[in-house]
């Protein structure tokens, strides 16, 4: 059993990103933007409503306050401010989710914040402090071996390691920067095979050809990747053909 998650609700106003409705028919968990890196209130409420109708778990995808950069730029924010920012985002999405008949079931950092707290101790602790302050029963998603998950476990949070189906890995088990060529995978069949490898072998092939151990309870398929829906469908179908039925972790 494995969870399939996707980043959704990332449109803004008249600007649409990805096919959220189609992805919600495939994934088991939805990392929904909270308005800081993407998503306006109407878009987020609609996405929450669609997730509830599809019986998909809602996760708060918290990020830096960076709409222009889509949350993919590092922000040298103080720990105090970051904790407040994350609490604010979780609360905003939780309110919309509850109005739609659901609730926030977990928290996942987005973009540059996600990558930063793999090693940045102060920001990792700031995010942990925010989740603990808002609702210590909420699980958190993060990169295996990250400072964030280590501190989350220390604080008594449920730390859920995840892997990425459509992102290239370094030999150290981290994600290749999006600034580098080949950082995002686009071949539908390759992505599906990678998901199967992650679930059945607990490994992933790095950019140098080496095999990296990745023990993940959830696999992410980015909703804004070209052919994202085809990738998600192909991955789910391949898992099911091997007797593996995706299911939410939360």
Image (cartoon, helix red, strand yellow):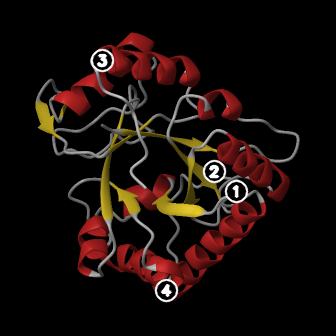
Q: Which residue is mark 2?
A: 70
Q: Secondary structure at mark 4?
A: helix
Residue closer to the observer: 240 or 170: 240
Gap in Å between the C-alphas at discs 1 and 4? 25 Å
Asked if residue 187 is positioned above or below residue 56 in the image, the reply reads above
Q: Going from the N terminus, do you reach mark 4 or mark 3 first?
A: 4
Give the quarter of the image for residue 179: top left
What is the total number of numbered labels drawn onto the structure image?
4
Q: Which residue is mark 3?
A: 193
Residue closer to the observer: 206 or 157: 157
Residue closer to the observer: 126 or 239: 239
Q: Residue at x 31, y 73 (%)?
A: 152
Q: Which residue is mark 4?
A: 133
Query: Which class describes the residues within 10 Å of circle 4: few (<14), some (14-19), or many (20+)?
Result: few
Gap in Å between the C-alphas at discs 3 and 1? 33 Å
Query: Which class describes the residues within 10 Å of circle 3: few (<14), some (14-19), or many (20+)?
Result: some
Q: Secondary structure at mark 1?
A: loop
Q: Going from the N terminus, do you reach mark 4 or mark 2 first?
A: 2
Instruction: Classify residue 227 as left or right of residue 109.
Output: right
Q: Look at the image and tell me in which quarter the N terminus lies.
A: top left
Q: Please report contact status of discs 4 and 3: CB closer than 8 Å, yes or no.
A: no
Q: Please report contact status of discs 1 and 2: CB closer than 8 Å, yes or no.
A: yes
Q: Going from the N terminus, do you reach mark 1 or mark 4 first?
A: 1
Q: Please report contact status of discs 3 and 2: CB closer than 8 Å, yes or no.
A: no
Q: Please report contact status of discs 3 and 1: CB closer than 8 Å, yes or no.
A: no
């Amino acid at each position: 059993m494995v969870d399939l998650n996707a980043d959704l609700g990332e449109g803004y106003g008249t600007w649409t990103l990805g096919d959220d409705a189609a992805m919600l028919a495939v994934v088991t968990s939805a990392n929904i933007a909270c308005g800081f890196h993407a998503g306006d209130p109407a878009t987020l409420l609609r996405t929450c409503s669609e997730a509830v109708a599809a019986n998909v778990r809602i996760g708060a995808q918290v990020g830096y306050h960076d709409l222009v950069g889509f949350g993919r730029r590092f922000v040298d924010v103080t720990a105090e401010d970051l904790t407040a920012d994350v609490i604010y985002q979780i609360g905003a999405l939780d309110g919309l989710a509850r109005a739609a008949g659901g609730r926030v079931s977990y928290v996942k950092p987005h973009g540059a914040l996600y990558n930063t707290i793999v090693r940045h101790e102060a920001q990792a602790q700031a995010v942990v402090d925010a989740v603990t302050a808002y609702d210590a029963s909420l699980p958190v998603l993060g990169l295996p071996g990250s400072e964030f998950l280590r501190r989350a476990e220390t604080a008594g949070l449920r730390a859920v390691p995840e892997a990425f189906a459509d992102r290239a890995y370094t030999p150290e088990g981290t994600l290749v920067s999006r600034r580098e060529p080949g950082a995002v995978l686009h071949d539908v069949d390759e992505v599906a095979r990678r998901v199967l490898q992650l679930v059945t072998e607990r490994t992933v092939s790095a950019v140098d050809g080496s095999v990296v151990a990745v023990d993940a309870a959830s696999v992410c398929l980015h909703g804004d990747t070209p052919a994202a829906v085809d990738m998600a469908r192909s991955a789910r179908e391949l898992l099911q053909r091997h007797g593996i039925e995706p299911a939410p972790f939360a």
